Image: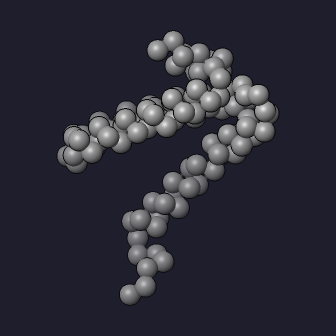
Amino acid sequence: MNWIIRAWKGEEKLWKVFWFGGVIIDAGFTSIKKILGHTEFTDALFAISAGIYLVWLFVSEWRCAFNAKWNGWGYIMRGFIILMPLWWYIWYILSHTDFGHRT
């Protein structure tokens, strides 16, 4: 758990934050949500915990972006962080509307 604090402070290697913090923990969240199912309570609990997790993840990835052997990963990571909210917005619009669907 110490790596979580180091990541928040920007002291951890980028690959650890990305793979452990971003990929593995996200897979765990997704699995738990599928197991618990959709109820008003579990959806609210998931939304709150996912919000806290995403703040930690994005801040940690941003701060650790240049803790890699190649500085290019830092620019790629920061670009990814900036573009993610736009991607989520586009995904939400396309998945919750008839936009783009032929009838």
Which residue: 54% across, 16% down? 3
Snapshot quadrant of residue 27: top left
Does residue 55 appear anywhere in the picture?
no
- The answer to which of 56 and 77 lies nearer the viewer is 77
Q: Position of residue 9 (x, y in %)?
A: 62, 18
How are the residues colored?
A: one colour
Which residue: 67% across, 40% down? 77
Does residue 95 appear anywhere in the picture?
yes
Height in image: 41 above or below 98? above
Q: Position of residue 53 (x, y in %)?
A: 45, 32
- Is 24 on the left or on the right of 87, as rendered? left
- The answer to which of 93 and 30 lies nearer the viewer is 30
Which residue: 51% across, 35% down? 22
- Is 69 on the left or on the right of 17, as rendered? right
Q: Position of residue 29 (x, y in %)?
A: 36, 37
Snapshot quadrant of residue 96: bottom left
- Is 99 on the left or on the right of 42, as rendered? right
- The answer to which of 82 and 72 lies nearer the viewer is 72
Height in image: 92 above or below 68? below
Q: Position of residue 36 (x, y in %)?
A: 22, 40
Height in image: 10 above or below 93? above
Which residue: 46% across, 75% down? 99
